[in-house]
Amino acid sequence: MGSSSPLPTIEAVAAAAGVSTATVSRVLNRPQVVRQALRQRVEAAVLRLGYVPHAGARAMMLGRTGTIGAILPTVDNAIFAKAIDALQRRLSVEGAQLLIATSDYDPDAEMRQAINLVARGADGLVLCGAGQRPELLAFLRQRGLPCVHVMTLPADPSMTCVGFDNAAAMAQAVRYLLDLGHREIAMLAGITHDNDRAAARVHGVRHALHEAGLALSPQGLVERKYGIAAARDGLRELMAAHPTPTAIVCGNDVLAFGALLEARRLGVDVPGALSIVGFDDLELASQLQPALTTLQVPAPTMWRTAAERLIAALRGEAAPRSTEIAVSLVVRESTGPAAGRAPMRRR
């Protein structure tokens, strides 16, 4: 075997780009402070020579590894694909690398993954919700590790969060259905155990119905895993209940997609006999027939803001502890007035 060529050095990159080694270092570690034309010249030299900075030396110099960990419940749901895209886009501007782990909605798995990411030098973490194990939260506080909780607004003032009030958002959808004359309203929810967002959405439905003098009956609440087949099964169970619901609110759009498909298979007219509401406003929601009424979550904005909160924390800059993201109801074709009842007019 022939001898391999020596690895390129930072001095070689500087010479090729016609700059100082300090400039190369700034481009690699703090690209946002370097003029675009100069940055592009250095980056071209890095690529041409095949230079890779030593991660250990870089971490020692900066006191950081330049990596951010994000633990998501799953990557099967398009809402979390949007999360990855938004996080990576914003962090890459800062020269940071995003590391992804999944928990499958299991807080013990989430804790293990968080510790693994920290052990591998993650400078900060992005977590979904605020229902983590107390031991994990204590571990992160003890290490002083920046952490942002997304998709929720917890009451704990010590948490940095970017999200929305899940209960209030779902209550908004229920009030809309009440205004359409619906009184037999059911819910196809996600599994609420160990999922604070799913549990809050159920609470929002209960609260809005209670305000109207109604209640969510035991047979009117069905929990299923977030999946099309599970949602179809849940819709069948709800439609077999007595009285039959005239409207169903779903814990997310995936559940609503399954409900719409199963309603069609059963010959249930949507929205003539049954109104269906989702949550998230995934791209497919507007393309279905009928198009899905849903609560729109501006996911790119939410996750990009979460990245900015982490960046500010790593720089030692002041930033809001709590950032609320507006969730709005998008009315489409899957909802309509309750059969035989006039829409209710609020005073």
Image: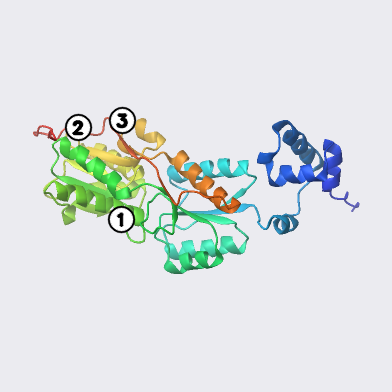
Q: Nearer the viewer, residue 329 or 243?
A: 329
Q: Nearer the viewer, mark 3 or mark 2?
A: 2
Residue 259 visible, this angle: yes
- Which circle's residue, 3 or 2, is located before the other in the chain? 3
Mark seen at residue 199: 1
- Which circle's residue, 1 or 3, is located before the other in the chain? 1
Report the amino acid beneath label 3: Gln
Image spot of residue 83 (x, y percent): 48, 44
Where disc 2 sits, the SS reads loop
Residue that numbered label 2 is attached to: 336
Report the amino acid beneath label 2: Gly
The residue at the far left in this view is 340
Where disc 1 sits, the SS reads helix
Considering only vertical position in the picture, is 2 above or below 82? below
- Which circle's residue, 1 or 2, is located before the other in the chain? 1
Q: Residue at x 75, y 34 (%)?
A: 38
Report the amino acid beneath label 1: Ala
Q: Nearer the viewer, mark 1 or mark 3?
A: 1
Judged left or right of residue 104, residue 60 is: right
Judged left or right of residue 229, residue 177 is: left
Image spot of residue 184 (x, y percent): 14, 44
**Could you tell me how far apart the alpha carbons at marks 3 and 2 are, in whole angstroms?**
14 Å
**Could you tell me how far apart the alpha carbons at marks 1 and 2 are, in whole angstroms?**
26 Å
Residue that numbered label 3 is attached to: 289
Considering only vertical position in the picture, is 108 above or below 328? below
Q: Residues within 10 Å of mark 3 (few under 14, many from 20)?
A: few
